[in-house]
Image (cartoon, rainbow, N blue to C red):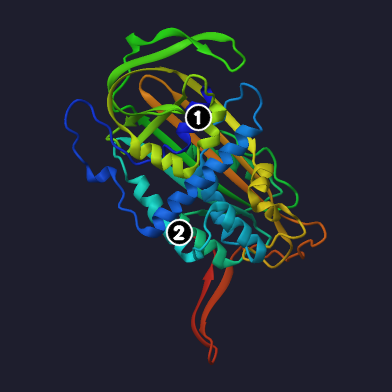
Amino acid sequence: MKTLFKTSIIVMMLCVSTSCKHETPKIDKKTFIDLTLTQEKILSASNSFGLDLFQDLVDSAKASENIFISPLSVSLALTMTYNGAASQTAIDMQKTLGYEGMSTSDINQSSKDLINSILNLDSKVVFEIANSIWYRNTFPIKSNFLSINKDYFNAEVQPADFNSQETVSLMNSWASNKTHDKINQIITQIDPMAVMYLMNAIYFKGNWKYRFETKNTTKEPFHLTDGNTFSTDFMVQQDTFRYLSNNLLTAVELPYGDGGFSMVIMLPQTGKTYKDLMQNLKAGNWSKWNNQMNSANIQIHLPKFKFKYEKLLNKNLTRLGMGIAFDDKRADFSGISNASQLFISMVFHKSFVEVNEEGTEAAAVTIVGISYTSIGNPPSYKIINVNKPFLFAIKENTANSLLFVGLVQKPVVE
């Protein structure tokens, strides 16, 4: 049952829905996104990819293991990386991410517009997205790759000394800052063969639109998959919520803030298990179930929970179809650099979630590592460090006409 709760949270950042509470609901245009056809495709692709990834993680999960991921975080980090892919690598990544039939420019522009729409969806909910690219400062990176990710994903670009432990500290500080200290470490050391890390961070904090009263929280038994039970804190609330019940599951939607974000609880019917739900939890069914929900007077008993999750996603993403991107001999990331054979060395995901009487706090960081093969070592470069007084000139190149000339003894910014 615990895993079911995580299933619902996967898509809560992308689910735009409303809730009723006795009074006639008033539609607030701020809590709805008017999607273009391409944006709808991007959203559908993100949902499909996320559910496929979640399915693979559940299939390989240990007994009683809690799982919590942000498909949006993984998708954004990989989409930034996709901008540097070429040939079969690009084709396989496009298919895995659900972007088939879409141009790269449409993917980038629609992703940017969709993200901006979600960020401004609900003034009562804190929802933040941040992207960054860290690359070895002696390795030649194509400026177009960096520009695209700056322009469309608002990525912070950081050339850095990959031989310094300080860079590890800076990357971890970035992750901690962007997740409000919920994820303090995303990397422990830099691979000697690494030339780039692409990072995405997502933070969410929303209070329930209709809060659970602490005085109603009681100890109740929770039934484990092995047949055992244990007593834990259950929050209790009775109100009007959107609800669905069929022969597979019972679903209840709990809105946050002004209703722009929601959590959907999905509970298997008697005789069913979360595995039965997982077999049917596809993008089409997810959309259908949400559309079939109607308002009903519900008393819900929801256990409180708080945990962290982390997972190296290389094997999962390989099984989903983008194995070539991890192949150090066949991967093609020439859109990032031509200096060496590049490949994805790791996709690591770390997350945090807490659900209590007030609401939900969640955070996730995804880091994609790009490395080069030992066969194609990058050439050595002469480093010019302009760290003392210097002269400079500006000239017209047709006739080498000197337009400006100067001396810099103290490079201040006034």
Image coords of residue 119 (percent x, y): 36, 45
Q: Determine whether 310 is above or below 236 in the image.
A: below
Is 375 left or right of 368, judged from the image as shown?
right
- Picture quadrant of residue 12: top left
Classify the position of the C terminus by image quarter: bottom left
Per the image, label 1 sits on a secondary structure element best described as helix
Residue 14 visible, this orientation:
no
Q: Give residue 60's quadrant in the image.
A: top right
User: Is residue 154 placed above or below 65 in the rendered structure?
Assistant: below
Q: Quadrant of residue 250?
A: top left
Q: Residue at x 51, y 36 (%)?
A: 280
Sequence-first tag of 1 and 2: 1
Image height of 44 relative to 21, above or below: below
Crowding near the residue tagged with mark 2, few <14, some 14–19, many ≥20 C-alpha atoms within 10 Å? some
Residue under label 1, please give it: 6
Which residue is denoted by mark 2 in the rendering?
A: 152
Q: Secondary structure at mark 2?
A: helix
The furthest residue to the right: 375
Q: How far from the left and from the top, in percent, is residue 163? A: 71, 49
Please say whether residue 216 is visible from this viewpoint.
Answer: yes
> Looking at the image, which residue is at 83% across and 60% down?
375
Q: Tell me the distance, in whole angstroms, between the alpha carbons under discs 1 and 2.
A: 30 Å
Residue 84, numbered label = none
> Can you give x and y, in whole percent of width and height, for residue 59 in the image?
63, 33
Q: Residue at x 57, y 73 (%)?
A: 391
Q: Amino acid at mark 1?
A: Lys
Residue 279 place in picture, x, y as percent: 55, 35
Foreground label between 1 and 2: 1
Q: Are marks 1 and 2 in contact (CB under 8 Å)?
A: no
Residue type at mark 2 is: Tyr
| Looking at the image, residue 276 lies above or below residue 193 | above
